[in-house]
Image: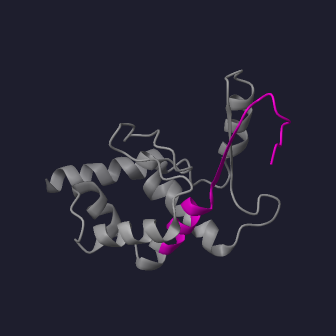
């Protein structure tokens, strides 16, 4: 089991090393928005981070960094499970309540909730990191609208 945990941790680091590189264009929100809006499906999905037109706070930047480097392999940096853990048992955590995320992560960290992978991951990050990453995921917004309505129906 220890070997599995070590390999799992290494895979997470390798998979997400590129995502944290500030020199690369990681405009996942813009890319997704374009693909979904151009897809012609019955509904479109719009994701955006808070303060889209302004600079992110230090806490949100740190939460995004943790999401991209630690959580993203399974839950996606955007909170939609699309990476290595893409299965029915890996939850989407986009726009989840901050307090709920904090309590769950602390439950994994301190052994109140038993889950081999999540317990290991939660033990790797500090309580301050937990607050930051919970803030990041809770601040992401999801808007689903009918394409027949104006582009910004809200």
146 in the magenta segment: yes
Task: Tell me: 112 left or right of 68.
Answer: left
Viewer can see residue 85: yes
Asked whether 49 or 154 is in front, the reply is 154
Q: Is residue 6 above or below residue 105?
A: above
22 in the magenta segment: no
Q: Is residue 12 above or below residue 37?
A: below
Asked whether 51 or 44 is in front, the reply is 44
| Residue 72: x %, y % from top left | 47, 50
Q: Is residue 42 above or below residue 53?
A: above
Task: Tell me: 77 left or right of 26.
Answer: left
Please report the bounds of the magenta region as a residue range: 131-154
- Picture quadrant of residue 117: bottom left
| Residue 39: x %, y % from top left | 69, 23
Check the image and name the residue furthest to the top. 40
How many numbered discs, if any?
A: 0
Task: Tell me: 92 left or right of 21.
Answer: left
What residue appears at the point 36 percent right and 66 percent down from the top-left corner? Answer: 104
Check the image and name the residue furthest to the left. 1
- Picture quadrant of residue 42: top right
| Residue 34: x %, y % from top left | 74, 33
What residue appears at the point 22 percent right and 71 percent down from the top-left corner? Answer: 111
| Residue 109: x %, y % from top left | 30, 71
Asked whether 80 or 147 is in front, the reply is 147
What residue appears at the point 47 percent right and 38 percent down from the top-left corner? Answer: 82
């Amino acid at each position: 089991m220890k070997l599995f945990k070590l390999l799992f941790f290494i895979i997470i680091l390798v998979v997400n090393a590129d995502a944290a590189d500030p020199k690369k264009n990681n405009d996942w929100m813009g890319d997704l928005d374009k693909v979904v809006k151009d897809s012609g499906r019955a509904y479109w999905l719009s994701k955006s981070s808070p303060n889209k037109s302004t600079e992110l706070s230090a806490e949100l930047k740190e939460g995004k960094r943790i999401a991209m480097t630690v959580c993203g392999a399974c839950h996606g940096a955007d909170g939609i499970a699309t990476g290595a853990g893409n299965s029915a048992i890996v939850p989407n955590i986009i726009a989840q309540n901050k307090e709920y995320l904090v309590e769950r992560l602390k439950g994994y960290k301190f052994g109140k909730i038993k889950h081999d992978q999540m317990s290991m991951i939660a033990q790797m990050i500090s309580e301050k990191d937990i607050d930051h990453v919970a803030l990041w995921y809770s601040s992401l917004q999801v808007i689903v609208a009918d394409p027949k309505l104006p582009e910004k129906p809200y």
